[in-house]
Amino acid sequence: MKKIIALAALAIVFTAQSASAQTTLKAVKDRGSLNCGSNGTLAGFGLPDAQGKWTGLDVDYCKALAAAVLGDPNKVKFVPLSAKDRFTALQSGEVDVLARNTTWTSSRDTSLGLNFVGVDYYDGQGFMVRKALKVNSALELNGASVCVQQGTTTELNLSDFFRAHNMQVKTVTFATANEAVKAYDAGRCDAYTTDASGLYAERLRLANADEHIVLPEVISKEPLGPAVRHGDDQWFDIAKWTLFALINAEELGMTQKNVDEMLKSANPDVKRFVGTEGNYGEQLGLAKDWAVQIVKAVGNYGEVFDRNVGATSPLKIDRGLNKLWNKGGIVYAPPVR
């Protein structure tokens, strides 16, 4: 009898999990669009222009996800979220995915009901100062006032860095990054701190960008990546493999321009990726050519990086750690197999 009850309980759990697993995918398909939680103020990652057209590395991830699920990268509603309300918006179901330059940490992964799908940008926190301050290292900032956004990992890292080096700091906090940057630009602080990628992006908005430098120190690990809600394994898988597809496409040499030609490839890895061999799309609950739709929509990871934050963007950030694992970086994805 105990065995029968245990099996029945297991069946109920499995059934509940199976039903839950359909929830987000079905909701997105029924709605006909993906709700993507985005930054809205950060160049290179998530920013709408005057016409309301969104661009950025995180934006392209959401376009790729929409392409995989709906076959159309334009079927995305971008929801601008502040650092403070981003997690609540995902938890409540206001957005289907959070792609907002968010650092993956243990507490966020375990206590907020989130699953991080991977890292789409390896970052680290830094400092920006005026050249006129004649400071060449963050270790020379003892006693400095530093503008920072509150309620972020940045605020804690700032405190830890100064404490670890026995230095004094006057922390000047603001509710939003926009307020912190404006205060720094107005001279209310000696330095501004955030992720290094954000420093390059925010410098473009300063009144006299050339008068400011980013100091060389990187004081933290900031693995940035999209997140989804706990409890929906199928959606978690789809979100993960969207990111993995972008990375694998670059490794396979597949681009927006040559993707149609690659459909004819005899390479087994390519055949599995494009869906001419195996049923990997069906295993995700998607079409056979799900990965092809992603590459057609936004290109591969290298193209997304260069266009938004890299060599062909206004930010011109070196790829560094964000190069592929076989090109000197640490970007790596499991294979489609």
Image (spheres, grey):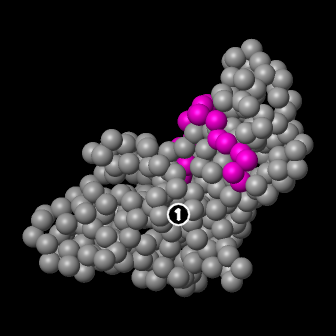
Residue drawn 84% across and 33% down?
Answer: 145
Q: Residues within 10 Å of mark 1 (few under 14, many from 20)?
A: some
Q: Position of residue 65 (x, y in %)?
A: 47, 70
Residue drawn 37% across and 65% down?
Answer: 300
Residue nearer the viewer, 260 or 333: 260
On screen, residue 292 above or below 202:
below
Q: Quadrant of the C terminus?
A: bottom left
Residue drawn 65% across and 41% down?
Answer: 214
Left or right for 136, reference 256: right
On screen, residue 75 above or below 37:
below
Q: Position of residue 167 (x, y in %)?
A: 77, 18
Q: Position of residue 332 (x, y in %)?
A: 34, 48
User: Would residue 150 be visible to someone looking at this image?
Assistant: no
Q: How many marks?
A: 1
34 inside magenta stretch: no
Image: magenta residue range: 209-226
